[in-house]
């Protein structure tokens, strides 16, 4: 896909999609969205960037190997369930905290980290597959 | 409503079993895809059907105001869809690689692991 | 949102309020160790040389945790943990009873042995491909299956196990592996899909997914309210397919000889046994009525599986395929226990599964050593001179031959004895006879393997002891890595054979829990009942106080009216 328009717009579009994917992931607890769909959006952003600019640019932009990112997501997801150990509650019991950052109450919770882990798993594994396919 | 869906599930199963009895891997893959859809529909139906009543507890209450649609089958189906989709993707790649390496998509011709003209075991001792 | 709700939600009605002790975390530890272990190896993908050692470390931790779990179960009875504080049956419950704990422990030991062996057997390329993470994640699926108390969760663990096993099966991507993997993948996927279908039916009929809850509800249901026959038969078919029982066994000998020998070893040891375990769990614990209905059918399947396995083993030239048929035969023996269904018989089935896990893994690994020594020859006709190559190996292999055939003093003897005795007691004489006859044929098949591979001097056409094929010697470090796991497994087999009472008592306890599952139900629903009772008492006290208060108020009001 070597059209000039696509190559010029692809980085902006990809950045926008990744921003949107983070938004979708974070709103996912109470509204439609979540880590899975967010990860899909992010992965499609990387796929599109790979089609436009070439796979090696995506790999360089990602810095970490996508599969390593996915593995980190898996660790994050399973680790988020571990926090309830310190509260003498069973595995995967959600923990919530509401700190006020710059006058805004922010809800931080273990389900959020679980969702971020799912996001990374989906994004990493799908990006890895897509980049492999684009290389061939 | 359940009755209609049951018949649909039956049709799906019939299609998938018919396709999976084929000798060609690509048809088997299509059968597998149809099978996973059949299962998803089956779980959906077995959770009983109800129209347009999402299982959302209204603000201020701690139980739903009226009988709602069963959310559990949908969670099960979501899990099953993700799993069966990834399996289908894996199977398609596997079938493609097998076609490349073995030069055939006819499973009766795939005799590398079990050669047709294998020697009998020795009868000494 | 859980925290800042502006109305009072009564969490105690839906959640477990009692604190969870740290010791209960042992129940999730096996899954966590293997998941996080596998993920950490993937993150260290450029340090491939550490993968093997790290994986062995994680698996050693798994063995330790499983041993602690089992020892706790033997003292306290089944222990449970329900995820996310939801009350069972709504949350996913993990339950460890003696059966699950024993199987998980043996599986972890076998995986550790295979991992140590892989240090010498897995190339750097295969490590980069992700051999060790796949091994760890497969163990996640296997131990998860053994420790879960939720039937849909069991399905998910099955899939975890299956997808990692696909990765292990095609780790080199050779032609023969692709061929074997096609059959393995399609048929196993169909089996798990069938499992899901049945679970869908069961959910439709009973309305629950928690095994203890399903079992209780089915026991309370009037006769014929749920299509028990259909559901039990479908479960039987699905798990027979996973376990490779006749007539759905032919994918196993078609695929188990294609991957690397370490992969064959762990597959032969564990995957089919998970099917047997699931069969025992669903038919004996969850729907005993269904098992009673199907006992004759299961008996026929068991007998035919044993005979087909033994005769198939006799008919193969490729030794690894002989072993594949032996796995099938072992499944038949375990199913004998399910068919007879008394406490002794279930004990025998569990014991046989344990024996089969140890023996089949050790057999494949021992044969792998021989393959390394003779340059990868696998056909009976080409083998020979094994005794000259390594007298130790031939002794270990002979022990395994005896154990696989069910001869004393090895671990295969006791379960067969228990199975024969209990089937005779229940009037299944022909079943006992087929156990014995299949054992006899297996002895011939295995004796022939040993005689051809080790006893005679060289392959067909050479004179005994002279001009045999050249044999490779292994370097010291490789020798240590391949011999230690096999020796450890054989030592366990001999130990169980000579001194069976510890494993026997654990299996007996497991069988007792399955047949009289009050303990199991108490473990799952005990916290709920205790909490409900507490709440009821608290409410009664509260109500009493309110009543008193309102009476006093009424008195005061009446006084005020004056």
Image (tube, coloured by chain):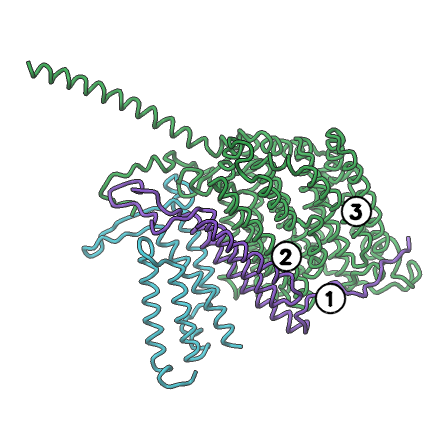
Chain colours: A cyan, B purple, C green
Q: CA distance from mark 2 to mark 3?
A: 30 Å
| Residue denoted by label 1 | B111
x, y percent for residue B19: 61, 63
Would you place residue C456 above or below residue C522 in this image? below
Is label 1 or label 3 in front? Answer: 1
Q: CA distance from mark 1 to mark 2?
A: 17 Å
Would you place residue C525 above or below residue C558 in this image? below
Which residue of the protein is positioned furthest toward the right in this rendering?
C463
x, y percent for residue B117: 81, 66
Is label 2 or label 3 in front? Answer: 2
Q: Quadrant of residue B99?
A: bottom right
**What chain does mark 3 sit on?**
C
| Residue denoted by label 3 | C401
Query: Which mark is on residue C187?
Result: 2
Q: Is residue C492 visible?
A: no
In this rendered view, identify the residue nearer to me: A30 or A120: A30
Which residue of the protein is positioned furthest toward the left in this rendering?
C562
x, y percent for residue C486: 71, 50
Q: Secondary structure at mark 2?
A: helix
Label 2 in the same subunit as label 3: yes
Q: Residue at x 77, y 49 (%)?
A: C308
For disc 1, the neighbor class at 10 Å (few under 14, some 14 to 19, many from 20) is some
Q: CA distance from mark 1 to mark 3?
A: 30 Å
Q: Is residue C398 visible?
A: yes
């Amino acid at each position: 896909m070597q059209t000039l328009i696509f190559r010029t717009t692809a980085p902006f579009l990809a950045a926008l999609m990744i921003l949107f994917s983070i938004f979708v992931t974070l709103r996912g607890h109470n509204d439609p969205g979540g880590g899975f769909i967010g990860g899909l959006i992010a992965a499609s952003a990387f796929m599109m960037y790979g089609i436009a600019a070439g796979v090696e640019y995506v790999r360089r932009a990602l810095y970490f190997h996508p599969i390593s990112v996915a593995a980190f997501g898996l660790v994050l997801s399973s680790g988020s369930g571990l926090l309830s150990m310190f509260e003498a509650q069973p595995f995967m019991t959600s923990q919530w905290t509401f700190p006020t950052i710059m006058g805004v109450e922010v809800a931080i919770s273990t389900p959020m980290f679980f969702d971020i882990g799912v996001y990374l798993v989906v994004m990493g594994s799908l990006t890895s597959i897509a980049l492999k396919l684009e290389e061939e | 409503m359940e009755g209609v869906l049951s018949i649909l599930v039956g049709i799906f199963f019939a299609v998938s079993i018919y396709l999976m009895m084929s000798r060609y891997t690509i048809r088997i893959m299509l059968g597998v895809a149809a099978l996973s859809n059949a299962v998803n529909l089956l779980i959906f139906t077995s959770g009983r059907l109800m129209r347009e009543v999402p299982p959302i507890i209204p603000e201020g209450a701690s139980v739903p105001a009226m009988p709602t649609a069963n959310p559990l089958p949908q969670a099960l189906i979501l899990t099953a869809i993700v799993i069966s989709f990834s399996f289908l993707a894996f199977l398609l790649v596997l079938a493609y690689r097998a076609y490349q390496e073995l030069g055939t998509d006819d499973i009766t011709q795939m005799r590398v692991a079990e050669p047709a003209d294998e020697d009998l075991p020795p009868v000494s001792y | 949102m859980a925290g800042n709700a502006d109305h009072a939600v009564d969490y105690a009605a839906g959640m477990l309020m009692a604190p969870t002790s740290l010791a209960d975390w042992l129940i999730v530890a096996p899954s966590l160790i293997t998941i996080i272990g596998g993920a950490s190896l993937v993150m260290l993908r450029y340090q491939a040389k550490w993968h093997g050692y790290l994986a062995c470390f994680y698996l050693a931790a798994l063995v330790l945790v499983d041993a602690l779990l089992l020892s706790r179960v033997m003292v306290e009875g089944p222990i449970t943990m329900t995820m996310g504080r939801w009350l069972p049956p709504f949350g996913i419950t993990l339950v460890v009873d003696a059966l699950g704990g024993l199987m998980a422990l043996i599986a972890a030991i076998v995986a550790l042995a295979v991992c140590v062996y892989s240090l010498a057997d897995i190339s750097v390329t295969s490590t980069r491909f992700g051999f060790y993470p796949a091994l760890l994640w497969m163990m996640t699926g296997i131990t998860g299956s053994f420790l879960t108390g939720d039937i849909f969760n069991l399905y998910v663990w099955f899939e975890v196990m299956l997808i990692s096993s696909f990765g292990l099966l095609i780790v080199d991507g050779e032609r023969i592996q692709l061929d074997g993997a096609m059959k393995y993948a399609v048929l196993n996927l169909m089996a798990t899909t069938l499992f899901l279908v049945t679970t869908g039916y069961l959910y439709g009929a009973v309305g629950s997914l928690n095994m203890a809850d399903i079992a209780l509800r089915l026991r309370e249901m009037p006769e014929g309210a749920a299509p028990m026959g259909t559901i039990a038969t479908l479960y039987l078919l699905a798990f027979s397919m996973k376990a490779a029982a006749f007539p759905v066994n032919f994918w196993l000998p078609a695929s188990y000889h294609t991957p690397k020998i370490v992969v064959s070893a762990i597959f032969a040891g564990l995957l089919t046994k998970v099917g047997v375990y699931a069969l025992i769990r669903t038919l004996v614990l969850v729907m005993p009525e269904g098992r009673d209905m199907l006992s004759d059918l299961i008996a026929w399947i068991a007998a035919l599986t044993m005979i087909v396995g033994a005769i198939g083993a006799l008919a193969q030239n490729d030794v690894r395929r002989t072993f594949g048929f032996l796995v099938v035969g072992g499944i038949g023996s375990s199913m004998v226990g399910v068919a007879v269904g008394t406490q002794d018989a279930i004990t025998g089935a569990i014991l046989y599964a344990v024996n089969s896990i140890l023996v089949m893994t050790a057999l494949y690994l021992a044969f792998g050593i021989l393959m390394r020594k003779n340059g990868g020859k696998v056909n009976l006709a080409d083998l020979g001179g094994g005794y000259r190559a390594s007298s130790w190996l031939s002794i270990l292999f002979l022990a395994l031959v005896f154990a696989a055939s069910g001869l004393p003093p090895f671990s295969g003897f006791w379960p067969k004895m228990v199975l024969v005795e209990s089937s005779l007691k229940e009037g299944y004489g022909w079943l006992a006879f087929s156990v014995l006859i299949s054992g006899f044929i297996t002895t011939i098949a295995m004796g022939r393997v040993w005689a051809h591979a080790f006893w005679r001097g060289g392959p067909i056409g050479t004179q005994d002891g002279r001009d045999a094929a050249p044999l490779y010697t292994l370097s010291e470090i490789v020798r240590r890595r391949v011999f230690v796991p096999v020796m450890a497994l054989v030592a366990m087999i001999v130990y169980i054979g000579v001194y069976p009472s510890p494993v026997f008592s654990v299996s007996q306890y497991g069988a007792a829990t399955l047949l009289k599952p009050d303990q199991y139900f108490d473990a799952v629903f005990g916290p709920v009942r205790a909490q409900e009772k507490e709440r009821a008492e608290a409410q009664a006290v509260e109500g009493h106080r309110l009543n008193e208060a309102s009476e006093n108020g009424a008195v005061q009001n009446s006084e005020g009216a004056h």
